[in-house]
Image (cartoon, rainbow, N blue to C red):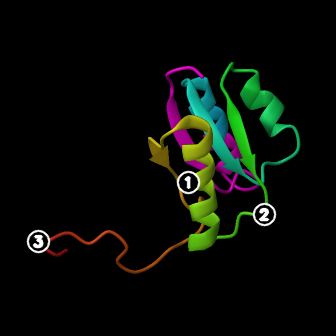
């Protein structure tokens, strides 16, 4: 296992997920991807990075937990993660002490 950053891309099967995975691979990130589009894993491995695929990822806590566990099991850590690319998410999801 190389000493590369490890990134999670839970939705590697649609919208910007595949492009994000390719960008991260081109920047030497090992990846854990959820439900990738056909051919994506081969493209990612072509960059010389390691890829772990997690099938059946849902957009909820259990789905994300499975991605994190796969990363910890295979790579020993997580350095970055994306979430729900291309979806509008409203409301406060990263509050800070000073308020908005």
Residue range of the region highlighted in magenta in the rendering: 1-20
Q: Per the image, is 23 magenta?
A: no
Residue at 78% in and 63% down? 56
Q: How many labels does the image show?
A: 3
Residue at mark 3 to residue at mark 1: CA–CA distance: 30 Å
| Foreground tag (2 vs 3) | 2
Q: Is residue 18 above or below residue 83?
A: above
**Mark number, residue 80:** none
| Foreground tag (1 vs 2) | 1
Q: Earlier in the sequence, mark 2 or mark 3?
A: 2
**Mark number, residue 68:** 1
Q: Which of marks 1 and 2 is nearer the N terminus?
A: 2
Q: Are marks 1 and 2 in contact (CB under 8 Å)?
A: no
Quarter containing the C terminus: bottom left
Residue, disc 2: 56
Residue at 50% in and 50% down? 81
Q: Is residue 84 visible?
A: no
SS state under label 1? helix
- Residue 37 position, x and y percent, is 83, 48
- Residue 57 position, x and y percent, is 71, 63
Residue, disc 3: 98
Q: In this view, does 92 lie to the left or right of 29?
A: left
């Amino acid at each position: 296992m190389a000493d590369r950053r490890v990134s999670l891309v839970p939705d590697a099967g649609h919208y910007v997920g595949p492009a994000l995975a390719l960008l991260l691979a081109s920047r030497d990130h090992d990846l854990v991807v959820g439900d990738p589009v056909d051919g994506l894993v081969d493209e990612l491995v072509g960059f010389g990075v390691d890829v772990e695929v997690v099938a059946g990822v849902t957009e909820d806590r259990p789905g994300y937990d499975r991605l994190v566990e796969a990363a910890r099991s295979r790579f020993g850590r997580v350095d970055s993660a994306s979430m729900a690319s291309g979806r509008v998410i409203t409301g406060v999801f990263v509050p800070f002490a000073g308020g908005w």
